[in-house]
């Protein structure tokens, strides 16, 4: 039963015959109310109306804004169920803060997310921090979530990242191959991770991972055109889709950007590698 439950819920996020456009809107828990996250009810309604395949939310916002998600074009719902200070503190210097006194914790369980109507849960997994105790706890925390997801039939998505003292280039394919494989070994069903920098090396990362990879957008690009170029590159690399946040809700024209993003993903509809 759990296996069928996972398949049904995953099908709401990774749609057959198309690459997934997921809007990440979970930033405020770690970064505060950054530009574009104001009026969340209205913003989430716009994501829904634009045909996003899924939306990533914290559970509090999911419950508060549920009416903005309902309708004939309802997106899949991914619940962020953890917190980290990996990015520093709101208004602080993340580069200097994130390397010391690292902390992360669960803020909900997969069962809580299921009760709220989520189709999947998502957690962080950071490596390269130089803090072996922190990373051991990251492994244990993600393994615990993955086992609970298996018991209740909830898809487990892990956001894998290389950050910290040991990491000169977070986009180095060697790091990407390491932490994406770690997530697969822990029991993840999907991965959210960095882009390697070019389609060729990203395709190598995707092909060496046994589960589908969706590429994150990260910080706001200098222009909508630059962000759209990344989407085309991700599609060419064979990834299953993208998680875009700031490049969506801080876009010059968000509705147009989402339309163009969908077009860019549709240009390469080949089934994603790893599925």
Image: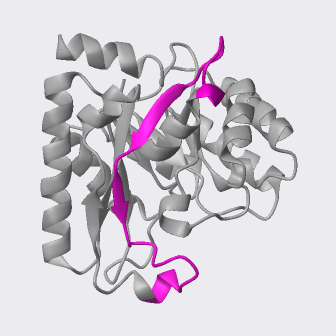
Instruction: Using the rendered image of the protein, determine whether residue 237 is visible from the camera's viewpoint.
Output: no
Residue 56 falls left or right of residue 137: right
Which x, y percent locates residue 73? 65, 16
Query: Considering the image in quadrants, where does the N terminus appear?
Result: top left
Residue bounds of the magenta highlight: 67-96
The answer to whether residue 161 is left or right of residue 218 is: left
Residue at the front extreme, as displayed? 64
Q: Answer whether residue 76 is magenta in the image.
A: yes
Seen from the viewer's position, the closer of residues 245 and 72 is 72
* Residue 202 in the image: above or below residue 255: below
Q: Residue 53's quadrant in the figure?
A: top right
Residue 26 on image: x %, y %: 52, 51
Q: Quarter of the image containing the C terminus?
A: top left
* Residue depicted at 23% across the width and 22% down the height: 153
Does residue 260 show up? yes
Q: Is residue 66 above or below residue 251?
A: above
In the picture, measured across the screen, residue 132 lies left or right of residue 35, that is left
């Amino acid at each position: 039963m759990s296996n069928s439950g996972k398949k049904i819920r995953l099908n709401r996020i990774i749609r057959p015959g198309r690459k997934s456009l997921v809007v990440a809107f979970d930033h405020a828990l770690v970064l505060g109310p950054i530009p574009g996250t104001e009026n969340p009810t209205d913003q989430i309604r716009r994501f829904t109306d634009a045909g996003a395949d899924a939306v990533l939310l914290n559970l509090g916002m999911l419950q508060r804004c549920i009416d903005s998600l309902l309708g004939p074009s309802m997106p899949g719902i991914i619940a962020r169920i953890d917190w980290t200070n990996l990015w520093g503190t709101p208004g602080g210097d993340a580069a200097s803060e994130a390397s010391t006194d690292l902390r992360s914790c669960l803020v909900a369980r997969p069962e809580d997310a299921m009760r709220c109507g989520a189709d999947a849960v998502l957690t962080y997994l950071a490596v390269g921090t130089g803090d072996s105790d922190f990373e051991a706890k990251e492994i244990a925390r993600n393994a615990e979530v993955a086992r609970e997801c298996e018991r209740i039939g909830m898809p487990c998505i892990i956001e894998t990242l290389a950050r910290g003292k040991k990491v000169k280039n977070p986009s180095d394919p060697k790091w990407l191959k390491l932490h994406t494989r770690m997530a697969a070994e822990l029991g993840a069903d999907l991965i959210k991770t960095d882009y390697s920098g070019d389609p060729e090396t990203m395709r190598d990362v995707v092909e060496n991972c046994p589960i589908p990879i969706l590429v994150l957008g990260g910080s706001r690009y200098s222009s909508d055109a630059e962000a759209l170029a990344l989407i085309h590159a991700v599609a060419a690399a064979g990834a299953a889709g993208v998680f875009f946040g700031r490049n969506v809700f801080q876009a010059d024209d968000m509705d147009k950007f989402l339309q163009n993003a969908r077009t860019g993903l549709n240009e390469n509809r080949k089934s994603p590698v790893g599925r």
